[in-house]
Amino acid sequence: MARLLVVVPSDTDPPTRLGEWLRDAGLELDERRLSGGEPLPADLTEVDGLLVMGGPQSSLDDEQTSPELVGVRHLLGQAVAADIPTLAICLGAQLLAQVGGGSTRVGADGPEVGATLVAKRDSADADPLFAPLPLSPDVLQWHHDEIDRLPAGATLLASNPRYQHQAYRVGEHVYGLQFHIETDPALVRQWADGDAVGVASSGLDVETICARATAVHPDLAEVWAPFAARFADLVRARATARG
């Protein structure tokens, strides 16, 4: 069975429904929760793909502030160098941009919070994961930093009016998503209750943010569960090629 390394920088963002979709697609998930002190492997030689989740840490944190991110950056750098099937979400996507030669900063337009839409770019039509998506898929946003510059040669796959770099690909098999697809209502409630600054920036109250997220979760599953299955196809193909 193809093996996916799942890096969870914070217990506040476990793989949740995304993990279920990937297991349903036939992957074995090797989950490492950094908040609990679980170690990361030194390299990716024993796995067929990589999933990096989000968390409240900032992509701008130095080694002293967030030492757990050092190993995450190291593995993402290996994934880019070897073009290993990778899905990096929110904080993960920001770290991926950095190690690939791009950059991040505190969001110029403030935090982006709650259920919203992104729009596919024309380049997504030729992408095996993004081509089947609807033109403007539902997503769940929750970030304070932004990716202000993509790695050189990266392919921009989705944008929205507030933050341009919503989804991108490095090489052929390494993907970054600024938004979240893994959430369930309980996780969004946890985030809303714990992020007064983000909630205030939205112009909505906690109950409205949570109600809108709950309403959109069935649509998220309809769109992103098949996306997860297509990503699993990439991981299985690498497992087959590795023998």
Image (cartoon, helix red, strand yellow):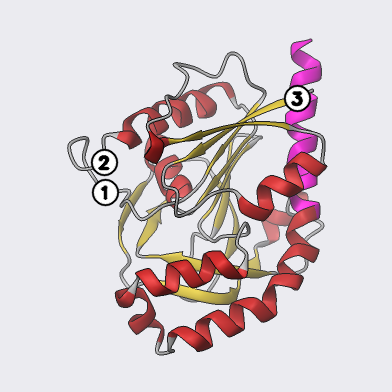
Indicate whether residue 35 is drawn in magenta.
no
Q: In the rendered structure, find residue 71 and report the number of the disc placed on it.
A: none
Q: What is the spatial separation of the Cα atoms under label 1 and label 2, in whole angstroms?
A: 9 Å
**Nearer the N terminus, badge 2 or badge 3?**
3
Q: What is the spatial separation of the Cα atoms under label 1 and label 3, in whole angstroms?
A: 33 Å
Q: Do the CB atoms of the residues marked 1 and 3 lie less than 8 Å apart?
A: no
Which sits in the foreground, 115 or 97?
115
Give the mark toward the camera: 1 or 3: 3
- Residue 122: x and y in percent read 69, 61
Q: What is the spatial separation of the Cα atoms under label 2 and label 3, in whole angstroms?
A: 31 Å
Q: In the rendered structure, find residue 60 and report the number of the disc placed on it.
A: 1
Q: In the rendered structure, find residue 66 and report the number of the disc placed on it.
A: 2
Indicate whether residue 236 is drawn in magenta.
yes
| Visible residue check, residue 219 | yes
Name the image quarter holding the C terminus.
top right
- Residue corresponding to mark 3: 2
- Residue 229: x and y in percent read 79, 45
Q: Do the CB atoms of the residues marked 1 and 2 lie less than 8 Å apart?
A: no
SS at badge 3:
loop
Give the mark toward the camera: 1 or 2: 2
At x 22%, y 35%, the residue is: 63
- Residue 51: x and y in percent read 58, 38
At x 60%, y 70%, the residue is: 185
Horizontal side, residue 50 vs residue 59: left or right? right
Instruction: Say if 79 sits above or below 222 in the image.
Output: above
